[in-house]
C-alpha cells in the first residue's frame, strides 16, 4: 500500500493503492464538490461517455474505516478503475496527444456548463484505455472565480498546443519536448524555436506570435503583465462563459487540424514488402504466433517492435491485454489511427526498447521508468533481436537479459539469421562482426534464463520462431 507516484502534488487529495485497488483520498472541499457531481449523475454520465476513468464513492463502512485509519485527515474516498499500463505524453504519437487535448477541452466545456472548471490542464491527467483517452484527476475540478477565462489555459497550451505546433512546423518529437520539462515549455522557449516570419504567419500568429511578443515585452519591463479581472459576487463566478466557449471551440478545431495534418511517415512502413518472407511465409508466421500465444495463454503481452500492430491484434484476439511499442513514431501513429476505427485491447506506445523512457520528476520516481511499468506475462519479440545486436550493439546475453527482465512467464522470439536480407541490410555499411550469430548460439545463450518449449521454422523463410518459458 502506498501513494502512487506524482499524487503528492495535489493537496486536495491523492491517489494510492490498497490491496491492488486504486483509491483517491479527498479533503472536505473536494468531497462536497464531487459528491454533488455524483448525486446529480454527472460522474456516471461522464464515465459512460468515456470522459473520465470509472469512478465510484467508497460506501462500505468497514472499508471506509480501514482507509481512514491509514490516511488520516481526509474526509472521504473514491475508488477508480485500475488502468494498466500507465503511459506518459513522451510515449504518445501526435494523434494520441491531440485526442488527449481534445478530451481535456471537452471536459472543460462540460464543467463550464455547470459553473465549474479544471484548475490545471496537464497531459499527465490523461491515460489511454483500449486506445481511447480518459481523464483521471477528478480533484482538478473546482469552482472558478470567473467563467469567461480559463485560468489553466496557459498550461493547456504548454502541454498540448505548443508540442503539436512544434511537431508540425519545426520537426520536433514529443519525447524531446516532454522529458526535460514536466510542465512543458514556456511561450518564450517555444517562440524562439520559430524564425520571426514564421511566428507571425497566419498559422501561428494567435498562439505563438502575439503571446511571444507580449511576454518578451513583459520580461524586458516594457509592459506590465495583464491583470486578472475581478471576481463576481461571493459564491457566483463572474464573466460570460460564452467568451471561454469560443476559445475552447477554436482550440479544438486547431488541434484536430494539426493532428490530421501530421503525416504518419514510418521508418519500416514497407517492412513486409522488403523482408525475407512472402505471403506464404507471412501466413505461416501469423499462424505460429497464434499457436504459441494459445499455448502460453498470457493475460498480458508486450509486443516489442510492433510496427503497425498486426501481431498485437493477434495477441488481443487471443484474449491478452497488449502493450504495443515501437521506436517508429509513424508506425505507432498508424496503429493508433486504426485503433480508433477498430477498437481492441491494445495500448500503443512510442518506446525504443534499447533506450526506454527513464524515470523523471521528483527523485526520478514521480514518472516511473518504462521498465518498471511493463511487466507482461509474455514478451512478443518478432524481428527485434537482430536490431538489438546490430543497431544497439548489444551482445546476445544482454538482449537475453533485457527480455528476462520484461517477461514474467513467456517469450516468443523470432530468430533472424545473418544471411537474411534484413540482417544484411542492417550491416550493409558496417564491419561484419556477426558471423557467430547462429540459431545454435542463440539457443545456447538464452538457455541460461529460459527453457525452450517450441522451435518452429517459418515456411518459405530462413527465420525460426521460438517459444521460451522463463526460468524461476
Image (spheres, helix red, strand yellow):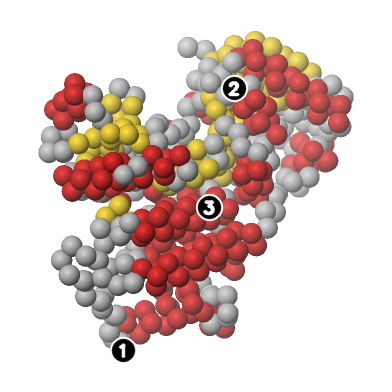
Q: Position of residue 431 (x, y in %)?
A: 73, 42
Whichever of callouts 3 and 2 sits on the residue coming sooner in the sequence is 3
Q: In the displayed structure, does residue 195 sit left or right of residue 155? A: right
Whichever of callouts 1 and 3 sits on the residue coming sooner in the sequence is 3
Q: In the displayed structure, does residue 16 sit left or right of residue 339? A: left
Could you tell me which residue is drawn at 23 percent across and 24 percent down?
60
Per the image, the residue denoted by label 3 is 99
Residue 396 visible in the shown view = no
> Alpha-carbon neighbours of circle 2 within 10 Å: few (<14), some, or many (≥20)?
some
Image quadrant in which you'd find residue 295: top right
Q: Position of residue 279 (x, y in %)?
A: 86, 31
Distance, label 3 to label 2, CA atoms, is: 26 Å
Whichever of callouts 1 and 2 sits on the residue coming sooner in the sequence is 1
Could you tell me which residue is drawn at 34 percent across and 63 percent down?
152
Per the image, the residue denoted by label 1 is 222
Q: In the displayed structure, does residue 144 sit left or right of residue 413? A: left
Could you tell me which residue is drawn at 63 percent across and 21 percent down?
318
Distance, label 1 to label 2, CA atoms, is: 62 Å
> Alpha-carbon neighbours of circle 1 within 10 Å: few (<14), some, or many (≥20)?
few
Distance, label 1 to label 3, CA atoms, is: 38 Å
Residue 315 visible in the shown view = yes
Per the image, the residue denoted by label 2 is 319
Could you tell me which residue is drawn at 80 percent across and 22 percent down?
284
Q: Position of residue 427 (x, y in %)?
A: 75, 41
Amino acid at each position: 500500500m502506498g501513494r502512487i507516484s506524482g499524487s503528492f502534488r495535489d493537496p486536495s487529495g491523492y491517489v494510492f493503492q490498497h490491496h491492488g485497488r486504486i483509491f483517491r483520498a479527498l479533503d472536505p472541499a473536494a468531497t462536497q464538490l464531487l459528491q454533488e457531481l455524483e448525486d446529480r449523475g454527472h460522474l456516471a454520465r461522464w464515465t459512460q461517455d468515456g470522459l473520465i476513468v470509472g469512478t465510484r464513492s467508497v460506501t462500505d463502512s468497514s472499508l471506509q474505516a480501514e482507509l481512514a485509519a491509514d490516511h488520516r485527515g481526509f474526509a472521504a474516498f473514491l475508488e477508480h478503475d485500475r488502468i494498466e499500463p500507465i503511459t506518459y505524453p513522451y510515449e504518445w504519437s501526435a494523434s494520441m496527444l491531440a485526442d488527449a487535448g481534445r478530451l481535456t477541452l471537452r471536459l472543460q466545456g462540460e464543467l463550464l456548463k455547470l459553473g465549474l472548471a479544471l484548475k490545471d490542464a496537464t497531459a499527465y491527467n490523461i491515460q489511454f484505455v483500449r486506445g481511447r483517452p480518459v481523464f483521471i484527476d477528478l480533484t482538478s475540478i473546482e469552482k472558478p472565480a470567473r467563467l469567461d477565462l480559463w485560468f489553466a489555459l496557459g498550461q493547456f497550451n504548454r502541454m498540448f498546443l505548443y508540442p503539436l505546433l512544434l511537431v508540425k512546423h519545426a520537426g520536433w518529437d514529443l519525447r524531446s519536448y516532454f522529458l526535460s520539462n514536466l510542465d512543458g515549455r514556456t511561450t518564450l522557449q517555444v517562440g524562439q524555436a520559430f524564425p520571426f516570419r514564421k511566428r507571425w504567419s497566419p498559422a501561428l500568429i494567435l498562439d505563438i506570435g502575439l503571446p511571444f511578443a507580449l511576454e518578451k515585452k513583459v520580461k524586458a519591463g516594457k509592459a506590465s503583465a495583464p491583470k486578472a479581472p475581478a471576481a463576481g459576487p461571493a459564491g457566483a463566478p463572474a464573466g460570460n462563459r460564452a467568451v471561454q466557449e469560443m476559445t475552447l471551440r477554436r482550440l479544438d478545431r486547431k488541434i484536430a487540424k494539426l493532428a490530421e495534418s501530421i503525416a504518419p511517415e514510418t521508418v519500416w512502413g514497407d517492412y513486409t514488402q522488403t523482408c525475407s518472407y512472402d505471403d506464404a511465409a507471412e501466413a505461416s508466421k501469423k499462424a505460429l504466433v497464434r499457436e504459441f500465444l494459445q499455448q502460453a495463454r498470457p493475460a498480458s503481452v508486450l509486443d516489442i517492435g510492433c510496427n503497425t500492430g498486426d501481431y498485437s491484434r493477434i495477441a488481443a484476439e487471443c484474449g491478452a491485454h497488449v502493450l504495443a511499442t515501437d521506436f517508429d513514431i509513424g508506425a505507432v501513429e498508424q496503429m493508433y489511427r486504426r485503433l480508433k476505427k477498430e477498437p481492441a485491447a491494445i495500448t500503443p506506445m512510442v518506446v525504443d526498447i534499447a533506450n526506454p523512457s527513464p524515470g523523471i520528476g521528483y527523485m526520478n520516481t514521480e514518472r516511473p521508468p518504462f521498465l518498471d511499468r511493463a511487466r507482461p506475462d509474455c514478451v512478443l519479440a518478432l524481428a527485434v533481436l537482430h536490431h538489438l545486436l546490430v543497431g544497439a550493439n548489444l551482445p546476445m546475453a544482454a538482449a537475453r537479459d533485457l527480455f528476462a527482465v520484461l517477461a514474467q512467464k513467456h517469450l516468443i522470439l523470432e530468430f533472424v539469421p545473418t544471411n537474411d536480407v534484413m540482417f544484411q541490410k542492417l550491416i550493409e555499411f558496417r564491419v561484419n562482426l556477426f558471423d557467430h550469430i547462429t540459431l545454435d548460439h542463440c539457443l545456447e545463450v538464452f538457455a541460461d534464463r529460459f527453457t525452450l518449449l517450441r522451435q518452429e521454422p517459418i515456411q518459405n523463410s530462413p527465420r525460426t520462431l521460438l517459444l521460451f518459458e522463463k526460468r524461476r
